[in-house]
Image: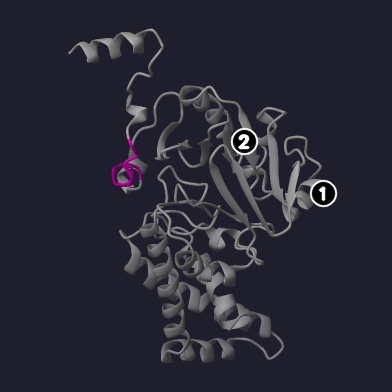
Amino acid sequence: MITRLLAAILAILGLLPMTTSAQQPFDYEKTKAEHGVREYTLSKLPARGYDYYKIAENAWFVHDDFENMVFFVTDVGVVVVDPKPDVSPFVLDVIPQVTNKPITHVIYTHHHRDHSQGARLFPNDSVLIASKATADLLAVANDPKRPQPAVVFDHDYVLETGGLRLELKTLGRNWHSQDDMVAWAPQQKILFAIDMFHPDAAPWIHFGESSDPWFAFGLPDLLLKQYDFNFVIVGHERIVGTPEHMKTYQAFIGDMKMTLGGILSSDGYQSAMKEAAGRYSESASHYLYKSGIMTASNVCAQQMIEKWQGRIRNAELNMVENCQTMFMHLAVLDP
């Protein structure tokens, strides 16, 4: 009893740290069950317009209705990843709530404005890091809201600061922009693959306006084999991505490939193309080409919606356009 009383007095005097909920061991399963599920996407945001939660012992996930960012608290400061203009003000509001340490590093994931224009909001003495491809594109943009990085790497870079190890890597090909990279925090088991997919939701139109759809289609296979992660950060949605979400996306891609393959080899599709050929003159092959794309894509979308309605959110959204993208690369560009 005396020992407990003495500890309480010392804590009050600031001579012994008081036990708080933030000091409790991180509960991965609880976080996943509360914040990696569809119900959380339907919950109401606080009046401040954002919310946040821990996704590792020293990592926080900050989100509004549709976008998110992550920051790490190290022994010497704070490392911020993916400086979005809309979410960065919220991150700057949250950081002082969890630590009094300075922001030491800010990492660009790619050059797109919606993922980089928040960089100007962070302290001038924080170190901006980017791949060479990103730095080159930022130089072309010449946008004061997207300052040039101080640290630039070609293919791989390891940031080690205050006990945090963050491995940055370009993959040789891109899935979304012209300058994508992955980031991996091995101790926290957090993987960053920004704009790769939307957890528990249909893909963005044209598979995220992908710069290299064929590589994008194979990215889940690559990352699931290469990384043992608890969470995957993709930059959008208020729920945090999980391995299960990525496996669902992997299954979705595989099903669309199989669905389109079945349509293209079906008697119904062949008959439809013969009928279309009879409607157009011999010099209008581009009309026949378009007819082939749209015939297959419309049937594909109908079948995919029937199979995936309820399994993912917004299954009907952009399904025709995404079947078109898959058709172009499965049957025309990258067979």
78 or 263: nearer the viewer? 78
For image coordinates 38% across by 16% down, the residue present is: 16
122 or 23: nearer the viewer? 23
Residue 219 vs residue 201: left or right?
right
Q: Is residue 31 magenta?
A: yes
How many C-alpha atoms fall within 10 Å of the one at disc 2: few (<14), some, or many (≥20)?
Answer: some
The amino acid type found where label 2 is placed reads Pro
Q: Is residue 96 above or below residue 104?
A: above
- Residue 328 percent coordinates (x, y): 59, 76
Q: Is residue 134 above or below residue 21?
A: below
Q: Which residues are magenta?
A: 25-35
Q: Give the number of the disc on residue 85.
A: 2
| Distance (Cα) linking label 2 and label 1 | 19 Å
Residue 215 vs residue 31: left or right?
right
How many numbered discs, if any? Answer: 2
291 or 65: nearer the viewer? 65
Quadrant for residue 28, please give it: top left
Work out which quarter of the rendered image holds the C terminus and state it. Answer: bottom right
The amino acid type found where label 1 is placed reads Val
Q: Is residue 128 magenta?
A: no
Q: How is the image coloured?
A: one colour
119 or 210: nearer the viewer? 119
